[in-house]
Amino acid sequence: MPSLKDVKTKIGGVKKTAQITKAMNMVAAAKLRGAQQKMEDFRSYAEKFNAAMGNLSSAMDSGAFPLMEKREVKTVEILVVTSDRGLCGSFNAHIMKMTDRLIASLEAQGKKVSLVCVGKKSISYFRKTGKVRQRYPDLMGTFQMFNARAIAQELAANFLAGDSDEVRIVYGKFKSVAVQRPAEQMFLPIQPSEVSAATPSAAAGSYIYEPSTEEIMEVLLPLYMNVMVYHAMLEVSASEHAARMSAMDNATNACKDIIHSLTLIYNKARQAGITAELMDIVGGAEALK
Amino acid sequence: MAEKLKLEVVTPKGAVVSQEVDIVTAPGYGGEFGVLANHAPFLSTIKTGVLTYKTGTQEETLMVSGGFCEVSNNKLTFLVESAERGADIDVDRAMRSKERAEKRLAQAQAQKENFNRTRAEAALQRALSRLKVAERGKAS
């Protein structure tokens, strides 16, 4: 039987923990709202961009661009996007697991794998594998487009230099506040089929292009990569906050359960103490008779 | 003027402008171009510079950087990396970045570094357009 004081201190401690997790839950909720707003803002841009890309690629013959060139795949680069902080349930672990699986299956096919990690969690997880080529900590939560641009440029430069023949992105997709799933996406070479799948407009051919379609494409393709990387980062940060929100909610509930059972123990111990004292008094009075 | 066209300026941070206008002048790939209602379908890349649009007698200017625009069915959509109104521009900061860019440009030219030079040029271009927009915003 734990002593009364022990139980009391423990209840106090758990209560404090519950307070913290509750606060973190609320912070995550506020941040989630911000991230979702950003996603909302970005969506119109991305949609219009995809539509324009669709128009363009249907108007020209693709394959003439180094960024779209399909090569025999020897080295695959994976861009892993995770959060910077933990305490968000299994969100990051799922992304890591998916990446691990991907690496294993690629290596089984005799391909080399290198990693570019965004977010501290993936950096520390993959540090010991020796596959990490570039790392970008402390970027999440800033939502700056130029961060995404730097990453996209790095990936493209490596691809164009022939050091990687294929680039994929693994990130956490935001399905809803309750559901976040790791997802994998092809990044480079850019696939025209995927691009034109948006909305091929009927009047695609009748546009006046200035400069030529090819030159426009040369400007648009890098922008398109920025859009993809930025999109992945937005998804991850929204998912991170959503995951943290539910994780902290669970933690608060668990704290409540523990407090409940500890209170039972405490009351039992108190009752036992009182009973023992009563017995003593009764025993003493009996002896005096 | 009876016919208007719908102007939309969209950045990754959301729409900046979405309204009916009479005329739009924008910095295109081959120099400035103007768009009126019933323009033929048109697609052009946009350089860093000043975008002007007019509704009636009211003229507005925006600083835009890098992107492209699409004209179709009296709808004009600009997809740019950033767009700022004159009132939102910090003139001091733009001045400072202009000086910084000029210095860097001179440095890069001296060392014949192409990469830094293009970057400095882009930064200078941005700073100059910002200043221009800020100035016009004050004048009107």
Image (cartoon, coloured by chain):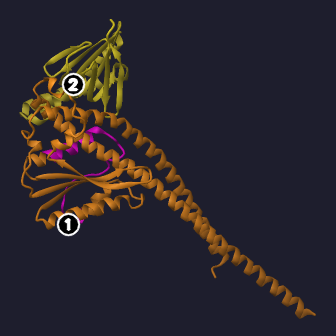
Labels 1 and 2 positioned on one and the same chain:
no
Residue A49's place in the image compared with A135, above or below, is above
Number of callouts: 2
Classify the position of the C terminus of chain A by image quarter.
bottom right
| Letter of the orange chain | A
| Letter of the yellow chain | B
- Mark 1 sits on what residue? A104
The magenta segment is: A127-156
- The picture places residue A217, in percent across and down from the top left corner, at 14, 33
Q: Nearer the viewer, residue A26 or A186?
A: A186
- Mark 2 sits on what residue? B48
Q: Which residue is pictured at 42% across the width and 50% down the height?
A: A241
Residue A51's place in the image compared with A174, above or below, is above
Q: Nearer the viewer, residue B40 or A13?
A: B40
Q: Which residue is pictured at 16% across the width and 47% down the height?
A: A188
Classify the position of the N terminus of chain A by image quarter.
bottom right
Is residue B128 among what the camera can see? no
